[in-house]
Amino acid sequence: MTNKENYASQIAVVKQECPEADDSEIGQEFERYEKEFLIPPEDALRSVIRKFQASTGREVTSGVNTPVREEIKVSRFEELGADDRNVTIEVSVVSYTPRTQMVRGEERQIAFGWIEDNPWEASSERVRWDYKDGGDKGASLVPGTIVRLEGASVNEWNDKRSLNINRTTRVTVLKEGGVSAPPVGDEPISISKASEVEGFVNIIARVMSTKPDVIVRRDGSGQIPVVRGRLADESGSISFLSWKEFEHEEGALVKLVGASVRKFRETPEINVNDGTVIEPFHDTSFPEMSQLADSDKVAISGLRNGMRDISITLQVESWNQRSFESDDGSTKVVRSGDVLDPSGRGRLTAWCEFDPSPGDFIRIEGGRVQFWQGSPDLVVDNIEQVSNLSDAPWERIDPEGHWVEEGLSALVNGGSRRGIMTTGTIVAVRDDCGIIERCPECRRVLRESSCSEHGAQRGQEDLRLRFVIDDGVSNASLLVSREPAESFLGMGIDEVKEEISKNGRAGFVSTLRTRVLARRMVVQGHSRIDDYGAMVLADSLEIEDLGPEEAAKAVMERWGVKI
């Protein structure tokens, strides 16, 4: 397509003001503005008109009757056309990769990356586009940030659309993002370091596994072939998703340039796209596949939502199955149970005919993790992924007394876990401790006899205590449900109701504060870490009664003080 065809509408406007100007020269000027200064033709229109007014001897006007561009406000990329300008849309920034280019002998920085529409919804409901930042907006376009773009423009090349962020584009940060990846340089980084960032990285790794897969398009128009697998180096391992052909076999050592780290739920994942360069790498000192075999082996304490292709050894605590009717009317069976290892407890779900007995030791290869009731749930999809072990990997654990002690700070800064025991000081007692009412449909707490999901309801009474527990470094909400609350208080729910009726809720809470505030508490239960913060849900709790000497000794041991 020629310049005259590319900029036909803009050339027509210039010709209205400068009839003597040559069409080709006008087109070349628009092309120069776009390529050298990264200014789209609609934004360069006024300057181009002034130039040709001056060159043809016409009076240079201070105002030009150029068409006013109407704002195009959309929420989804699919609503945009190939020629749309002055676009306003809210997006999530996935990546930002700056590059330096020489423009007329001077270095200028532009950037490329990915953005996703529908940023306030789950990632499965979003569509991803490429974008180019020619307006030096890097301070606002941090990966993980949600921004509103005003004045962006659509670009189409080879039937693929992207968004241009220009100098005149306004970028408003609506939600701050996380840690951004460093600019891509020549030096690769380790997998452990790549796992801490989001954005483009270079890594050298050995291919541990590959598996062809497909992703079904959300609009039902077909499937996208992909390759999933796992990469490893001395620092750890990470799963990858390749959107293009991946022809490297298991065991191959490869260098990836321009791969993208993206978090799937809570778990970082390497994305390989059309712009990623994958090449064989030779390093005789790099660990062999057998030496890296343990890199994908994890314990229950290390499970995170979204992990894939994991290997883990477990002891089965309980097992059951249930049948349900699927959307297509067929009856399906799902099997699940509680499992444990020396690091904690968890849940296992099997979508295959797998029926272990309590006490069995099992091995899972290629499992995945998804959230279930606020904590990671291991999932196996076919029987080939799981096997029974004849030799016990550890002395059989008694489930009744299996509580793994963990510091509160470690829990707050880690992932959700079951079967933990932690200690901290109660620094706050919430005013809503005592009797609450729950929705009979969904068990949500009612507010003024109304459920946020089911409207006005006749509530079911329940008992709940809410504290804040602190270890001097970190803190978390401590939630105590009816059974452990009754055990801790030494009172049943009816006795609590009677006390509240006599002294009021404020009186009950005041008595509770006198008992627990500034006291150290030992809690057994599970932790839930999510976007709303850290919460410990107690199965049992008790006040830690330490004498002055024992308390002083505990403090010295904690901080390594020796006298």
Image: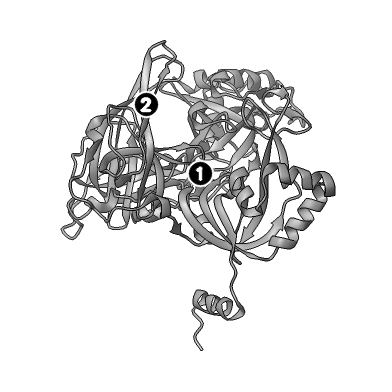
Q: Earlier in the sequence, mark 2 or mark 1?
A: 1
Amino acid under disc 1: Ile
Residue drawn at 52 percent across, 49 percent down? 527
Secondary structure type for disc 1: strand
Q: Residues within 10 Å of mark 1 (few under 14, many from 20)?
A: some
Name the side, left or right, on which 259 lies relative to 99.
left
Q: Which quarter shows the N terminus?
A: top left
Q: Quadrant of residue 471?
A: bottom right
Q: Which residue is at the front of the view, 125 or 368?
A: 368
Residue found farthest to the bottom: 563
- Please tell me the numbered disc located at residue 334: 2
Residue drawn at 71 percent across, 29 percent down? 459
- Please tell me the numbered disc located at residue 110: 1
- Please tell me the numbered disc located at residue 330: none
Name the side, left or right, on which 385 lies relative to 97.
left
Residue 156 screen position, x and y as percent: 48, 24
Amino acid under disc 2: Val
Secondary structure type for disc 2: strand
